[in-house]
């Protein structure tokens, strides 16, 4: 069953975040994932949304999404992101 990772991101240091953005695609692809949305403008139709960036990743399965998130490759990218931005990562099967 496919799975989606939704990410709401607030950027603190844009230069450092750009470095994170360069590191992430290869890690996603390695686990069969792909970017569906990557920072496109968000229009709020109802309610509140106060984040800088929205990202949606699709993986072939929940297991592969979790393996990606915990992988050594992504941990290196996550280390770069840790001082550049704060975010929320949500995993949903569909």
Image: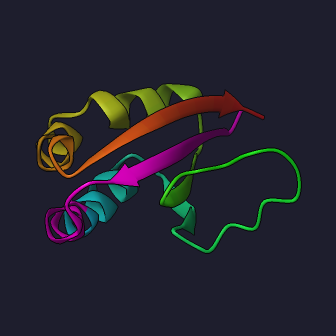
Residue 11 is situated, as x and y percent measured from the top left of the image, at 33, 56
Query: Where is the C terminus found, in terms of image quarters?
Result: top right
76 inside magenta stretch: no
Instruction: Please say which color scheme the image uses.
Output: rainbow
Residue at (28%, 58%) from the top-left corner? 24
Q: Position of residue 4 (x, y in %)?
A: 63, 42
Instruction: Give whichever of 53, 19 is nearer the camera.
Output: 53
Q: Is residue 79 left or right of residue 86?
A: left
Vertical order, 87 against 18 (above or below):
above
- Residue 3 is situated, as x and y percent measured from the top left of the image, at 64, 37
Q: Residue at x 59, y 73 (%)?
A: 40
Kindly indicate the quadrant of the structure image that contains residue 72.
top left
29 sits left or right of 85 in the view: right
Residue 50 in the image: state x and y as whole percent: 58, 50
Q: Which residues are magenta?
A: 1-20
Task: Residue at 36% x, 29% y: name it.
Answer: 67
Q: Is residue 83 above or below residue 29?
A: above
Residue at the spot 78% in from the left edge and 60% down from the top edge = 44
């Amino acid at each position: 069953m496919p799975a989606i990772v939704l990410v709401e991101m607030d950027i603190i240091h844009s230069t450092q975040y750009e470095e994170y953005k360069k590191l992430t695609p290869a890690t996603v692809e390695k686990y069969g994932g792909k970017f569906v949305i990557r920072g496109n403008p968000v229009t709020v139709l109802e309610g509140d949304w106060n984040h800088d960036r929205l990202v949606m990743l699709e993986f072939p399965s929940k297991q592969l999404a979790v393996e990606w998130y915990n992988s050594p490759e992504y941990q290196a990218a996550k280390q770069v992101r840790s001082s550049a931005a704060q975010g929320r990562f949500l995993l949903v099967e569909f």
